[in-house]
Amino acid sequence: MSATLVETPLLRLRAFRNLFVAGLVSQLGSQISYVAIPLLAVTVLGAGAGEVGLLAALATLTALVLGLPAGAWVDRVRRRRLMIVMDAGRAVALLSVPVAWWTGVLSMAQLYVVAVLVGAGSLLFDVASMSIVPGLVGRERLTSANSLLVGTAAGMDVAGRSLAGVLAQVAGAPVAVLLDALSYLWSALWLRGVPEPALPEDGSADGAESLRERIAAGVRFILGNRVLVAALVQGAMANLAFPLCSVLLPVLIVGQLGYPEWVLGAYLAMGGLGVLAGSSFAHLLGRRFGTGRAVWVVSVVTAPAALVIPFLDGGPWLWAAAAAWFVLAFRTGVNNVLLVSLRQRVTPDHLLGRMTATMRLLLTGALGLGGLLAGILGELWGLRAPLWLGAVIMAASWLPVHFSALRRSGPNTAGHPC
C-alpha cells in the first residue's frame, strides 16, 4: 500500500467512492422494506404473531443453508460481478410484491418466497462486499473505511425506517417495497464503476481443494483464534436477542397498542441513530482503549439497558424503551466497526470470503432463530414473553468478552490484531 494511497481521503479513492455511493440508496431502500414488508403482512394480509415471526426468520435462516458454501464460492469468483447480479436478483424479487398486490394475488406464501430470495441475495452480496473492502483501501485504513460504511448504513437506517412509516401510512406499504426494488437497481449501476479486483492467490499448496476442504479451512481458521471465537459468541447472543425484542413490534405497537405506523418507524429509527452514533465514536474509542477493551467497556455499560424494553407500553414507557433501543444500537455501531475491522485485519486475503461467510452463518443464523422464537413465544405466551427473553440474553451478552483475551487488548493494540 503506497503512502499516497494511505494519505488520500477515502472518498477521493474512486473505487471506494463508487462502492460507498452504491450503498447509499440501496441501504435506504432496504430499511424501508424492513418496516414495510411486516406492515404489509399485518395490515393487508392480517398476519398474526406466528406469521410475522416466520417471515423475519426466513429472511435470515437462509444463511444456515448457504452460508459456508457461499464463502468458499466467493473466494473463487469475481466479487464485483457477483454483487451486481445479486442486486439485480433482489430487485426482481421485490418488484413481484407490488405487482402481486396491484393484481390482487398477493399472499403470505409469496412474501415467504421473497424473504428467502432476498436473504440469499443479501448473503452473497454482503460476503463479497466485505471481502472486497481491504483490497480497495488497504488494511491500514480498515477501521476508518468501516466507520464510514457503517455510519452511512446507520444514517440510512434512520432515514429509511422513518420514511417507511410515513410512506406506509400515506402511499401504502406496496409502494414502499417498490422503492426498495429500485434502490437495488441504483446500486447495480454504481457498482459498474468499481474496478474488478484480481482473484486472491490461494494459500494452499496447489489451490485445488474440494469445496468441503475449502469450507473446513475457513472454519478451522476462526475456531483456532480465541479472540474471534469470543467476538463470535457475544455477537451471536446479541443477534439472538435483537429479533426477540423487535420482530413483533408491528403487532404490539400498531396492532395491540393502536399507534399509527409512523410511531413504529420512529421507534425503529432510534436504533439507526444509535448505530450511527456508535460507528462515529468507534474509531476514537478503539484508539483510546484498544479494540477489545473498547468493546468490553461499551458492552458492560450498555447491555443492561435491554431490561427496559419489556415494559414497552403506552405513554412514557414507549419512549423509555425507544431510548434503550438507541443505547443497545450504539453498542452495535461500535462493534460493527471495531470487530469487523479486526476480523478483516487478521484474515489472509484468500480466506476473507470464507471467514466472512462463516461468521455470517452463525450471526445471521442467530438472528433467524431469534425471529422464529419470537413468533413461537408470541403465539404461546403473548407478546411480552419474547421481549423478556431477548432482554435477559442481551443484558448478559457482555460476558463472553469479559472472560476472553479480547478484553485485555489495550491502547497499543487498537490498530493491530489482538
Image (tube, rainbow, N blue to C red):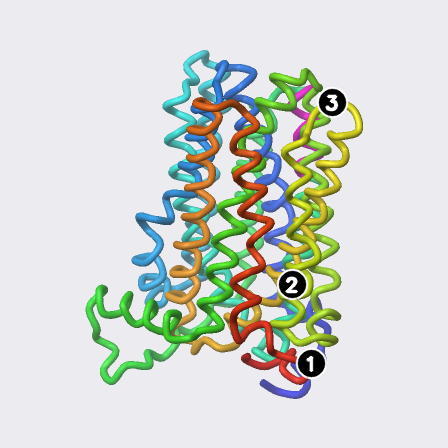
Q: Which residue is mark 3?
A: 314
Q: Is residue 299 found left or right of 129 in the rendered image?
A: right
Q: Going 41% across and 14% down the picture, which residue do you hit?
A: 105
- The answer to which of marks 3 and 1 sits earlier in the sequence is 3
Q: Which residue is mark 2?
A: 17
Q: Which residue is mark 1?
A: 411
Residue type at the position of mark 1: Pro
Label 3: how many Cα within 10 Å (few below 14, some 14–19, many 20+): few
> Is residue 401 rendered magenta in the image?
no
> Is residue 164 rendered magenta in the image?
yes
- The answer to which of marks 3 and 2 sits earlier in the sequence is 2
- Where residue 391 sits in the image (x, y, percent)? 59, 42
Q: Is residue 147 found left or right of 78 in the rendered image?
A: right
Looking at the image, the residue that sits furthest to the top is: 104
Q: CA distance from mark 1 to mark 2?
A: 30 Å
Q: Going 45% across and 22% down the picture, which residue do you hit?
A: 379
Point out the image quarter for the C terminus.
Answer: bottom right
Q: Are marks 1 and 2 in contact (CB under 8 Å)?
A: no
Front residue of this view, candidates 349 and 394:
394
Q: Nearer the viewer, mark 1 or mark 2?
A: 1
Instruction: Specify start and end residues of the magenta stretch as a single range.
Output: 160-170
Q: Are marks 3 and 2 in contact (CB under 8 Å)?
A: no
> Please, what secondary structure does the residue beneath circle 2 have?
helix
- Where residue 366 sits in the image (x, y, percent)? 44, 48
Residue type at the position of mark 2: Arg
Q: Are marks 3 and 1 in contact (CB under 8 Å)?
A: no
Q: Going 65% across and 80% down the picture, which residue do you hit?
A: 410
